[in-house]
Amino acid sequence: MRGVLLWLGSLAMAATVAGCAAKNLGCAKCDLGVDLNVPLPFEDLAGARDFSTAEPPDLAVSTGPDLSAGKQRLDLCVLDSDCEAALVCRASFKSGPKRCTKGCAMNSDCLSGERCLPDPIGGNTCQMSDIGRVCAVANDCAFGCLTAQQYCTAGCVTGSDCPNGFGCQSVGSPGQRVCVKVEADCASNTTACIAAAACDTSASLVVSSCTIACATASDCPQRAQGFATWTCNGSGICKRPADVYGPLGQAVRASYACNAASATINICNDTQHMNFTSFTIPAAPSVSCSASSTTDGVAGDNCVDSCRYQGGCVFGFACTAVGSLGAGLRIGICLPSQGGNEVGQACTTDSECAFGYCARTLGVCSRDCTFDGVCPSGSTCQAGTAPAVEGLTFRYCQ
């Protein structure tokens, strides 16, 4: 149901990070804009989203990783001694598979999709980000748990350090800047936001949506380059772009309604949706503009976030540059990851692959190595086709 204009007196930090006390941050009204937009198309590795187009012929199916000594980064391992010098064998994430990784001082020391996090043995190591993972207590996460909202978070300097759908805000007392989720429906769940006052019911939104306080737009969620951007309004509130009408997050079933112009729109937080299994964009269902509730998309129609390599994706998904906004602009989208198949092993969907990329035309798993140039043993980082992504030549493991 459409919301009404909300005047926020204060955006209180009611959440706790690993037991920290609450902290209040001031802000005033949240005034979001409205406009009409439609979902944008995606393209595959070849740039044409034509699954009959053959990908590089030397992407051969392998029988799986070799666990002998001298393993490289990202290789599966059992002991530190399995890995090359200067590497250690650690769980990729809590209760996850062990892979060779390295010590670190900052996030920039790590690969795409990783963060520099406390190592259980001491110091810090590069580990897969678990931001957005369900948690109840701090020990469920690598960094910390927002216990009231029940998801893992991590430290940040700006919104660019967080997955799309999360912004960077100070929480707790003393304050810690951490990634805070905004892609949540607060109409049906009053505890979804970082504070009750952070539920935005602006008239431009079809469904009430969480937001956060900000000093500049850099604190707000960061969509892929080429999309309309979030802004920080004069009252210090992150403001959704005019093409966004709701909060539904990554992998949530897409839902539809009418906007003020009586046009059918989806209420995904990034406006994009797809079927992860068939890798297609489902058609919108028939929508009655007089209905008092939204209309779900067909089975398998899920919201999908665009992404940037620095912030990556929420837990369980990988930023893979197989999306397109047209006009020669390639973007990353968050595809299901953490499957049991390694690079070069057989697949039919991205979710079967450890690194969230199934080269469907040949039926083998790959990895987007554009950002870091790193591939597991037995594969190398190869240049793909134009266009570029974030100013970089698209590359993938083969």
Image (cartoon, helix red, strand yellow):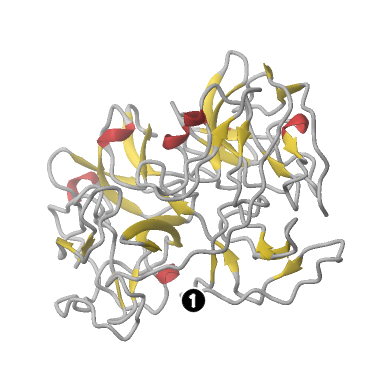
Query: Label 1, on which residue?
Result: 280
Residue that lies at the very extreme toward the front in this rendered image: 261
Q: Is residue 244 above or below residue 235?
A: below
Amino acid bearing label 1: Thr
Outermost residue toward the top in this view: 174
Residue in the image at 57% along x and 17% along y:
175
Residue nearest the viewer, comparing 158 with 345: 158
Residue furthest to the bottom in view is 52
Which residue is pictured at 50% across the width and 71% down the height?
276
Q: Nearer the viewer, residue 397 or 10?
A: 10
Q: Residue at x 44, y 62 (%)?
A: 335
Residue visible at 73% across and 46% down in the picture? 204
Q: Position of residue 92 (x, y in %)?
A: 37, 48
The image quadrant of residue 262 is bottom right
| For residue 355, above or below residue 361 | above
Image quadrant containing the C terminus: bottom left
Secondary structure found at label 1: loop
Which residue is at the front of the view, 268 or 66?
268
Number of numbered discs? 1
| Quadrant of the image containing the N terminus | bottom right
Residue 26 rendering spot, x and y as whole percentages:
69, 17
Image coordinates for residue 370, horizontal then vertical, percent: 24, 53
Q: Alpha-carbon neighbours of circle 1 within 10 Å: few (<14), some, or many (≥20)?
A: some
Task: Point out residue 308 in the picture as x, y percentages from the top left corner.
Answer: 39, 47
Q: Is residue 48 left or right of residue 215?
A: left
